[in-house]
Amino acid sequence: MQGTITLDNPQLGDEVNGSFIGKSPNNHFKWIACPDCGKQRWVQNSNISSTNGRCPSCSGKVRKSIKTPESLGIDMDAPKVGDIINGRFINRNPMCLYRWAACQDCNYQRWIGKGDNYLGRCKSCVGHMSGTKANGWKGGRVEHHGYIDIKLSHEDFFFPMANSNNYVSEHRLVMARHLGRCLQAWEIVHHKNGNKSDNHIGNLYLTMKQYHKLGYGQAFQDGYEAGYKQGLIDGGKRR
């Protein structure tokens, strides 16, 4: 990395080990510009976020210009939703602002970073969310060991096929819809081309466990015999 950086004229974003600029070799430093005055200098990576990139001079000016909760009309014993204060007054980062927010589900209130990607819920309520309200909701379609699972609602005609998490394998659901009935547990839906995620009806056929195992066993035997014969042929060519 150092071979591509000119230390006499570094560019914004350049990073070097401290040993190259007369500083601790145990840390890395980035060449950044103060967002207020534009002054450029090397700053230890771990210190950038705590100062928001400001130089010591501008950081001091910011601290002096910080408004107290009293001057903002904020009662620290009973803050209101939407109140914004500097982190120094709540034992947080003094270079950041914090907002008093309330969870829309349980109304739990607390200070959060003003710039945080707040979704309106506390961590506890987010953890209990499920279905379409969950942050990780992917439309009820998930991949599991190569198969595609579909989440069904309790009102769905094919819900009896779902597992305890209300999911059913898509290939079984496609076949059930094609037949117009729920499948029995002993009925197996096989992928003709071996692709577990290729679930169009033309690639599926219905069978039973014992025949499904026989089919796999026969396919394995056929493949083994074909490979063995090919090996003999190739070996004969090499000889």
Image (cartoon, rainbow, N blue to C red):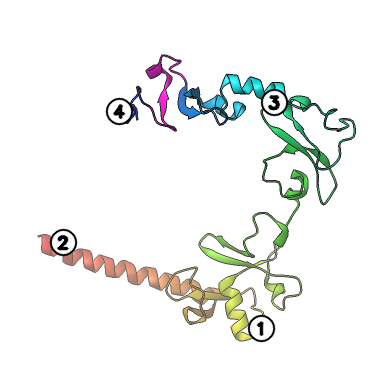
Going by the numbered disc 2, the residue's amino acid type is: Gly
- Mark 4 closeness class: few <14, some 14–19, many ≥20 residues within 10 Å: few
Disc 2: which residue = 235
Going by the numbered disc 4, the residue's amino acid type is: Gly
Residue under the point 82% across and 29% down: 69
The tag earlier along the polypeptide, 3 or 2, is: 3
Q: Nearer the viewer, mark 4 or mark 2?
A: 4
C-beta proximity under 8 Å, tags 3 and 1: no
- Mark 1 closeness class: few <14, some 14–19, many ≥20 residues within 10 Å: few
In the rendered structure, which segment of residues is drawn in magenta?
10-26
Q: In this view of the protein, which residue sits in the foreground, 219 or 210?
A: 219
Image quarter for residue 169?
Answer: bottom right
Instruction: Report the number of numbered marks.
Output: 4
- The CA span between labels 4 and 3 is 37 Å
Disc 4: which residue = 3
| Element assignment for label 4 | helix
- The CA span between labels 4 and 1 is 68 Å
Disc 3: which residue = 94
Image quarter for residue 159?
Answer: bottom right
